[in-house]
């Protein structure tokens, strides 16, 4: 019991000494992450969730039960930081349009805004929109090259596979 009291007193004394000499122990800052995405021209205002990888090495997708939520791939750059930043959202569900239903309608120069946990709102302008077959997905352009990438499904729906044949990808750079 006396040993525990000495440890507590020693810790309190160390804290008092640091404060007396103007030094405080700084708590490590929390990692910044994107919280929401806004695309005024297509009426998107959606929260973002963090997405990782599945056991197969594919990016997780937001749950179908939350069609109005998009997801930030947490192994990509935080939007506004240097590097490739990837945000994924569904185009639709079995019952209704989802968050990125109108993504293919974006045009060059239109704005995308991402609100981050540090309070910053980072603005991007659309550079290009492309639709590619999933077998020719441009991995380097999406996951390596700098800028914001928004990804959803598109093209023809393959009922046998239960998925779309293509992806719609929006490339954007800081405005």
Image (tube, rainbow, N blue to C red):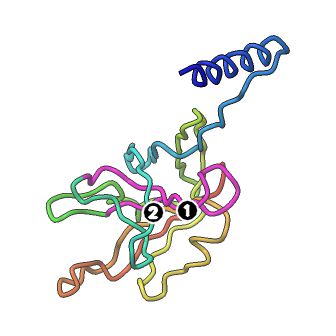
Q: Secondary structure at mark 1?
A: loop
Cα–Cα span, label 1 and label 2: 7 Å
- Looking at the rendering, the stretch of residues picked out in magenta corresponds to 66-90
User: In screen coordinates, is 81 left or right of 94?
Assistant: right
Q: What residue does disc 1 label?
A: 75
Q: Secondary structure at mark 2?
A: loop
Residue ID at (42%, 55%): 71
Number of other residues with Cα within 10 Å of mark 2, as a class: few under 14, some 14 to 19, many 20 or more: some
Residue ID at (49%, 60%): 73
Q: Earlier in the sequence, mark 1 or mark 2?
A: 2
Q: Position of residue 82 (x, y in %)?
A: 70, 56
Q: Would you identify the image quadrant in which residue 101 lies?
A: bottom left
Query: Which residue sits furthest right?
Result: 21
Q: Are marks 1 and 2 in contact (CB under 8 Å)?
A: yes
| 132 magenta-colored | no
- Dominant SS in magenta: loop
Number of other residues with Cα within 10 Å of mark 1, as a class: few under 14, some 14 to 19, many 20 or more: some
Q: What residue does disc 2 label?
A: 52
Q: Position of residue 158 (x, y in %)?
A: 23, 84
Q: Is residue 19 above or below residue 42?
A: above
* Nearer to us in this view, 128 or 85: 85
Query: Which residue sits furthest left?
Result: 95
């Amino acid at each position: 019991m006396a040993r525990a009291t000495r440890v507590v007193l020693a810790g309190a004394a160390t804290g008092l000494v640091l404060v007396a000499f103007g030094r405080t122990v700084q708590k490590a800052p929390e990692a910044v992450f994107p919280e929401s995405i806004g695309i005024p021209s297509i009426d998107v205002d959606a929260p973002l969730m963090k997405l990782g990888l599945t056991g197969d090495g594919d990016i997780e997708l937001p749950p179908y039960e939350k069609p109005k939520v998009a997801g930030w791939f947490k192994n990509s750059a935080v939007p506004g930081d240097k590097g490739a930043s990837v945000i994924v959202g569904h185009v639709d569900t079995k019952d209704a349009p989802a968050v990125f239903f109108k993504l293919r309608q974006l045009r060059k120069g239109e704005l995308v805004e991402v609100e981050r946990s540090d309070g910053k709102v980072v603005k991007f302008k659309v550079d290009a929109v492309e639709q590619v077959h999933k077998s020719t997905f441009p991995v380097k352009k999406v996951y390596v090259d700098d800028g914001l990438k928004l990804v959803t499904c598109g093209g023809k729906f393959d009922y046998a596979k239960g998925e779309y044949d293509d992806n719609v990808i929006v490339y954007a750079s800081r405005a």
